[in-house]
Amino acid sequence: MIHEPADASGHGPLAEGSLEPLILDPSTAGCDLDAWRKLSANALDPNPFFGPDFLIPFLENTGKSGVRLFVIRCGKTGDWLMAAPMGRRRLGLAVSAASSWATEYGPLGTPLLSSSAPQGVPAAFLALTAERARLPLIAFPYLPFESATARAIEATGNWSFQRGPVSMRASHSAGPEGEAQFAKAFSGKRRKELPRLIRRLSQEGEVKLESFSTGEVPHHFERFLQLEASGWKGTRGTALLSHQNTARFAREMIAKFAASGGVRIDTVSVAEKPIAMLIIILDAGRAFSWKIAFDESYARFSPGAQITLFALERNLQEPGITGGDSLAVPGHPMIEPLWRGRLSYGTLLCARSVPGRALQIAAKYDLALEGDIRRVARKLLRRAG
């Protein structure tokens, strides 16, 4: 563990009792777990993928040994004020940067920033990253641009900020706005067709739409793993069970979230057999749709749409849920018509030197090119499927 004070600009020590930097190996951060969990619970914008219950199993089982947890804490109280896993990575096809470690397993790159953090904390975090990573460009991929955390980072002086290409993915609101979104999704032809399909499905056995949480989760997660592996993801080798390390990571992570009530599994079953399942991670009032699977032999009954709409309805019924994030790729043909909200996100590029600003420009083009290639690849895969 590296532990030494620095001021908000990275030039010299702070007064005693002010901000302190930490750099931790997440897998050995046991003595700091309480502070880490407290920050995660009180973050300005929740991000379960940067909390210990997700990040430690993920890094330990995917071999990302070079990733470190960068932290700014209060020297007087020891409270963590800002934290994110950081590592060197290529942003697109060519440009490298010191980047927060958001991946497709957890496509949300919002650093954990305390809701009570003083104004200089994001500046201290950027300074720490620039000094220790020794790279002129800092990147935050998968960052919701309209979040309070993004605004706090962009308000930092003496830094240049550029936003990479903007993407939009499905989400939903809560309260009256969420109810209005649900009414639009469950209307017209869909309002007649989905219940009709359920009635047809009931001819094969009793149909149940259920939610499972806490102690019920591990058993039903095993059923989810089998369901996912039996479909196209299993055929292509991208299911969680396709590799020992991803299966181990997922089981450990889900067990940790289940112990704290941070996960829900929604299920559509017929004759006690699950035909569609959706894993919802819950964090600080936000519902994140992590993984979905359905039995392709029941495709004529639209099991994916049934479970997605059911999950939306369940989220709206929970008084503590303030909104949902689908975590889906932009333009997802099944989820976007059902979750009618939209979340804008992308990569925030941060620099304060001449070389860093030059890399900002190059990175924007690099990210745009990679995005074009990914879109073409997804279209080809859909046609192949």
Image (cartoon, helix red, strand yellow):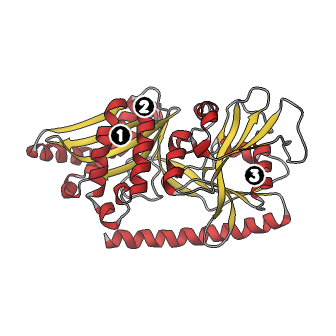
**Secondary element type, mark 2:** helix
Residue at the spot 34% in from the left edge and 67% down from the top edge: 236
Which amino acid, mark 2? Ala
Q: Where is residue 243 in the image (x, y as percent from the top left)?
A: 38, 59
Which amino acid, mark 1? Ala
Question: Which numbered tag is attached to residue 259?
Answer: 2
Which amino acid, mark 3? Thr
Tell me which numbered mark, 2 or 3, is placed earlier along the sequence. Answer: 3
Residue at the spot 81% in from the left edge and 42% down from the top edge: 4
Seen as rendered, the residue at the extreme left is 203
From the viewer's side, name the closer residue of 319 and 233: 233
Residue at the spot 62% in from the left edge and 62% down from the top edge: 165
- Left or right of 211, for residue 46: right
Question: CA separation, marks 2 and 3?
Answer: 33 Å
Mark 1 or mark 3: which is in front?
Answer: 3
Question: CA separation, marks 1 and 3?
Answer: 39 Å
Which residue is disc 3 drawn over? Answer: 129
Question: Which numbered tag is attached to residue 55?
Answer: none
